[in-house]
Image (cartoon, rainbow, N blue to C red):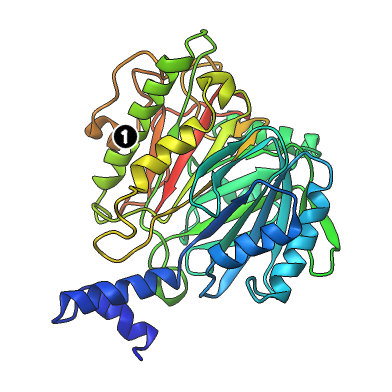
Amino acid sequence: VLSFGRAQELARGRCVSRGVGRRCAGTVAAATRIEALLCNTLELERMVEDAVSTLRVQYEASGVLFLYTRFRACRTRTAELHAALVERGVLPRNVPAFRAQVWGLLGLTAAGRPLELEEGPGVLIVVFPRAFAELEAGFDSDAAQGASPHVIATSVILSGCEEAFVQEVEALDTDGKLVPSVFGGVARGRTEALHVGGASSGADAVSIRWLRAGTAPAGAGLRLAHVQTMGNRTSGRGGAIAQQRAKELVAMQQKAVAAVPPAGGHPPRAIVVFACNGRGTRLYEDPSMETSLIHEAYCPVKEAENSEGRSHPAIFGMFCGGELGPRAGHEGSGSSDTEEPLSTQEIWAGHAAKDGVSHLEVASAGQTADSAAGQRQGGIRSSLQGFTTIVG
């Protein structure tokens, strides 16, 4: 049996046999994969069965996140589900766990089907490897105003019950004091730390700190983070027009990520979506549109694994009561459904687009968050906007 370190060397191509190298790359990827599962039921036994068959936590985890919709018994089910999965050995016992009630969920079911839950019961489970991310209660606004050398980006879920704290963070973002690699959204209800046994404690936020390559444990970490604003003006141009524009934006981001050295050609580890709760069927008329477009782009049906043996990226996210990050246009009036997409060079420059779409890339070698900021309109409010974020 190869040691993990030896497998990493083989995965980088230091092996005579290309086939062996690919198999080792697959082993390493599986051992450090971000796991995500969307359960669109409240039947505990079914949720446990789906999690047992889908989640393969073969690594040292840094945290577990449960997002749930506002539906009777959903909050209780998260505690029961957490306890059951710990008991079954699916989730580690002594790893921080958090939960938050959100406006809606985005992700993949146990059958691999892309789904957006805007109404009805649902629970999203995400497990983060220590090699890529750190989870913690709260949001360190002081640290977020300066780029941390070992953090490539920070996703934050702000509690919808802490209005004063949300306003404080909004003021920092509007004034341009937060680094542009901070993005996220406002939950519908409380964010909490969840303990084995069902006990919980309130928190004003949950932060996901994505670790930079070379600074994470075992030399792992991430090499890029790309944040794209999916902005749509409330101009009545929904339906087929909005669907086509969203498809162009997804393809444009995919092209931009593939062009970033040294990550060109490498698949992303996760695609995280923070969407305005006015999107979904209200904008596109058809259900699960954006998640389906992302799934189609990054998870081709004919390929179970890519050429390096790595599985497809985790896809997960939430509908928000306000988004934190780059905002298209001015005063929430940006539109991303009118003009042609930008070229890769314009995206790389990180400037606000002519079509009102703000693009941000941080993480390439030698690039700082400030140099990638471009024109950034902050503030936790939007006009049908959201953020599709890729980390890899």
Residue 103, given in percent of the width and then of the height, sits at 69, 35
Give the quarter of the image for residue 259: top left
**Residue drawn at x 63%, y 28% as measured from the top left:** 277
At mark 1, the secondary structure is helix
**Above/below status of 328 relative to 152:** above
**Above/below status of 269 relative to 353:** below
Tell me, yes or no, if residue 335 can be seen here: no
Tell me, yes or no, if residue 159 can be seen here: yes
**Residue drawn at x 79%, y 69% as measured from the top left:** 196
Give the quarter of the image for residue 266: bottom left
Residue 65, given in percent of the width and then of the height, sits at 65, 56
Residue 243 appears left or right of 57: left
**Above/below status of 20 relative to 363:** below
Most foreground residue, 302 or 227: 302
Reading the image, the residue beneath label 1 is 251
**Residue drawn at x 51%, y 14% as measured from the top left:** 233
**Residue drawn at x 24%, y 61% as measured from the top left:** 307
Number of labels in the image equals 1
**Above/below status of 321 relative to 384:** below
Q: Quadrant of the N terminus?
A: bottom left
